[in-house]
Image (cartoon, rainbow, N blue to C red):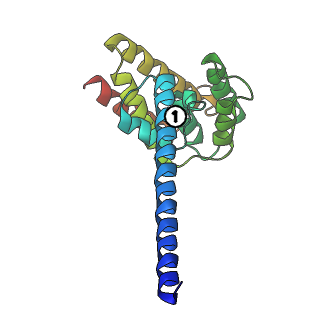
């Protein structure tokens, strides 16, 4: 075998290795995309939403099929953080709301909830989650949408009132009132659609 033949053979081997690696990368990417799509589908079933853009947003925010059940608690968490920290009363009310929604102690959803009650989530998580809630409510009947929105606002108001005030005065701070108004506006967008 001449040097020229050996060089050509080495070139073919390198080329074959290159294309084999590229093919494996494409296959792995397809596998990851299929797994992400399956997870989005399961998350959509859990959350009751089919809108792929909403599901992509939720997935980018870190929600999983196991944690998406705390989605409707996020405005309550945001309310609890409105004054800079979460009080024990606020935490207790949110955990009680979680238990009433079937979120068991120690579950993945409960662990995520605990992290968010300990460390304030990003503003982006709050905003995108509220938009996702609105999209989920839009898919429901008018009666269900109204009842769910009213329930969410009632719970948010209870969280706002939990730690403040003396004899019922000043129980809801200005920051909390503004946040309640913002949540109401966002939910109203869905009811007018």
At horizontal 69% and vertical 27% (from top left) the residue drawn is 92
Position in image of residue 77 (x %, y %): 57, 36
Q: Residue furthest left?
A: 193
Residue 157, compared with residue 28, is above or below; it is above
Position in image of residue 44 (x %, y %): 46, 27
At horizontal 65% and vertical 23% (from top left) the residue drawn is 103
At horizontal 52% and vertical 66% (from top left) the residue drawn is 17
Q: Which residue lies furthest to the right in this view?
A: 106
Q: Mark 1 points at which residue?
A: 39
Position in image of residue 67 (x %, y %): 59, 32
Position in image of residue 160 (x %, y %): 56, 32
Residue 37, compared with residue 104, is above or below; it is below
Front in this rendered view, residue 39 or 28 = 28
Q: Which residue lies furthest to the top in this view?
A: 143
- Drawn side of residue 180 relative to residue 76, left or right: left
Answer whether residue 171 is visible to the viewer in this image: no
Front in this rendered view, residue 185 or 70 = 70
- The C terminus lies in quadrant: top left
Q: Residue furthest front?
A: 1
Front in this rendered view, residue 148 or 92 = 148
- Drawn side of residue 109 relative to residue 192, left or right: right
Answer whether residue 101 is visible to the viewer in this image: yes
How crowded pointer 1 is (Cα within 10 Å; few <14, some 14-19, many 20+) is rated as: some
Question: Which image quarter: residue 105?
Answer: top right
Q: How many labels does the image show?
A: 1
Front in this rendered view, residue 193 or 66 = 66
SS under mark 1: helix
- The N terminus lies in quadrant: bottom right
């Amino acid at each position: 075998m001449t040097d020229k033949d050996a060089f050509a053979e080495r070139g073919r081997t390198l080329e074959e290795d290159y294309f084999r690696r590229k093919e494996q990368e494409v296959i792995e990417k397809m596998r990851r995309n299929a797994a992400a799509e399956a997870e989005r589908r399961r998350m959509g079933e859990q959350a009751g939403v089919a809108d792929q853009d909403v599901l992509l947003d939720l997935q980018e925010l870190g929600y999983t099929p196991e944690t998406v059940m705390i989605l409707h608690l996020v405005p309550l968490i945001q309310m609890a953080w409105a004054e800079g920290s979460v009080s024990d009363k606020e935490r207790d009310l949110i955990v009680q709301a979680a238990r009433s929604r079937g979120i068991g102690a120690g579950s993945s959803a409960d662990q995520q909830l605990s992290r968010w009650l300990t460390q304030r989530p990003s503003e982006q998580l709050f905003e995108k989650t509220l938009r996702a809630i609105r999209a989920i409510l839009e898919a429901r009947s008018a009666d269900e949408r109204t009842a769910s929105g009213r329930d969410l606002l009632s719970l948010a108001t209870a969280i706002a009132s939990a730690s403040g005030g003396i004899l019922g005065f000043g129980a809801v701070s200005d920051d909390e009132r503004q946040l309640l108004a913002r949540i109401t506006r966002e939910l109203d967008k869905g009811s007018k659609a």
